[in-house]
Image (cartoon, grey):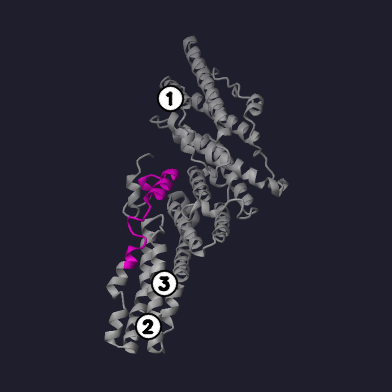
Amino acid sequence: MNPDAQQADMDLGPVTHVNLLSQKGKSDSEYISLDDCKNELVEMSHKLNRVIWQQLPRIGSKVFPDSGNFDRNKEMTDIKNDLHKTVKKMLEDGFQTECIKVYNISRSKFLNKCLCRLGLQDLNLWDVEDENVGNLISTFHTALGILFPHESRLLQHIFAGLNLESSILNMLEWKRVEIELWVKFMVLQSRIRSNFLPEASLGYGIHPLTRGVMNCIRRVCEVTDNIAYFDIHSIIQMLESTLDAKSRNYINPAFGYLFTLNNNRYMQFMARYKPLRLILGDDWRQIHKSKERQNIRDYLRFIWNKVLNLMENNESMAANVAVESMRLFHLHFSDICRVQFTCFSVENKLKERIRRSMKKMLLPLYEKFIVRFKDVVGENVANQHIKFGMSDLEDRLDGLFSERQFLKEPWKRAVEASGLRKRAVEPSRHPYIADHNSH
């Protein structure tokens, strides 16, 4: 975006002309009060629009930039506080319907203008040339990572404590626009190669695409009337296909498995939201639980492959071969533990399932491996070469994905971004939700 040209070209003047003085039976003083409040609300909304538009070019091409930083602008904060006071006054004077109408028209028109200037309104993805895909992705980051999250926070701030948020959300149409943009963005993602967006730069935690799509679906499901406009199953299936493709971009397949596990877990978590749970049904949950078990098996089988081969192929061997096998076991086991010690899962229950499956897979084989080794080389020689008893090995495995390595913050940020309240899931099953008080 060229900020000077677009600032000059963009019509950020009055965007709403609503006759709110059509109610009969009001005195002249009441008319003036309502008109003044309306004009004040519109004027401050325009001021906010200008500040927002001036901030957008500074974002650059960041991959889903932190939208929270976008709010940390003193002028923007002051305008929001003034808007809150004006809205509160209008509601106290009994102008609830008028207030909501002005707010919705003003914000919707601004968003439409932004999307138009960003080139996302009525976008036909099939007209986009391959060389322009990278720039278009950055534009989607601006719209989905900044504009829409900001509007949601703005709504919460301005109507905070006024018990009107649900009424306003029922009237807003941008949720429909937002989810349509997410769908287009996923289609666009399917056209890009890994060099456009290196997955390694995002780690293997919850992908911004997963968080954005699932949170948007949750907001759409809050209003029953909106559900009819979307095939939620197809949208989620498209998300899963996109994430599956991304998981294959990792040079180390182990990280691809972890990426799939973490994102699948987040989707299951979001699916516990009651309206979405009813839409997806029990079959969807069972299928994803089964996928999770298979992903855990694939992940563990891959990372422990060298150790498993040593323990599974030791039926007949000479003493010198047995000693070499034990040496290689210690070498591979230590190397794998060193790498896995730095890995994490985004949720405590998933971590425990991985750890439990890991012990179930390794411990019985290791016990047989030790017995066979002692039979071949003898008890005394075996004791000189065996570094880990059964309890020692189990302790080492318990240290992987350990509590101090378990990163609570990504999961807490995901919960905060989702807006789910503590009552949406059982607190005992997700203890970290209890720490979340911002919603």
Residue 81: mark in rendering: 1
Q: Which residue is drawn at 50% across and 51% down?
A: 202
* Tag 3–tag 1 contact (CB < 8 Å): no
Labels 1 and 2: the sequence-earlier one: 1
Mark 2 sits on what residue?
Answer: 323
Residue corresponding to mark 3: 332
Q: Position of residue 12 (x, y in %)?
A: 60, 24
Residue type, numbered disc 1 = Asn
Residue for point 64% across, 46% down: 134
Q: Where is residue 247 in the image (x, y as percent from the top left)?
A: 54, 59
Q: Position of 393 compared to 222: left or right?
A: left
- Which quadrant of the figure has residue 117? top right
- Residues packed near mark 3 inside 10 Å, few (<14), some (14 to 19) or many (20 plus): some
Disc 1 and disc 2: Cα gap in Å?
73 Å
Q: What element carries label 2?
A: helix
Residue 186 vs 56, above or below: the answer is below
Return the x and y of residue 406 as percentages of the image width and height: 36, 55
Q: Are marks 1 and 2 in contact (CB under 8 Å)?
A: no
- Determine whether 103 is above or below 427 in the image: above
Q: Which of marks 3 and 2 is in front?
A: 2
Instruction: Determine if the magenta segment contains residue 393.
Output: no
Q: Bin the neighbour count of mark 2 within 10 Å (Cα to Cα): few under 14, some 14-19, many 20 and up.
A: some
Q: Give the range drawn in magenta.
A: 396-424
If you read the primary sequence from the N terminus, does the residue marked by circle 3 or circle 1 appear first?
Answer: 1
Task: Report helix, strand or loop for mark 1.
Answer: helix
Q: Earlier in the sequence, mark 3 or mark 2?
A: 2
Give the secondary structure at mark 3: helix
Q: Residue at x 45, y 74 (%)?
A: 306
Kind of residue at disc 2: Val
Tell me the amino acid under the disc marked 3: His
Residue 303: x %, y % from top left: 45, 68
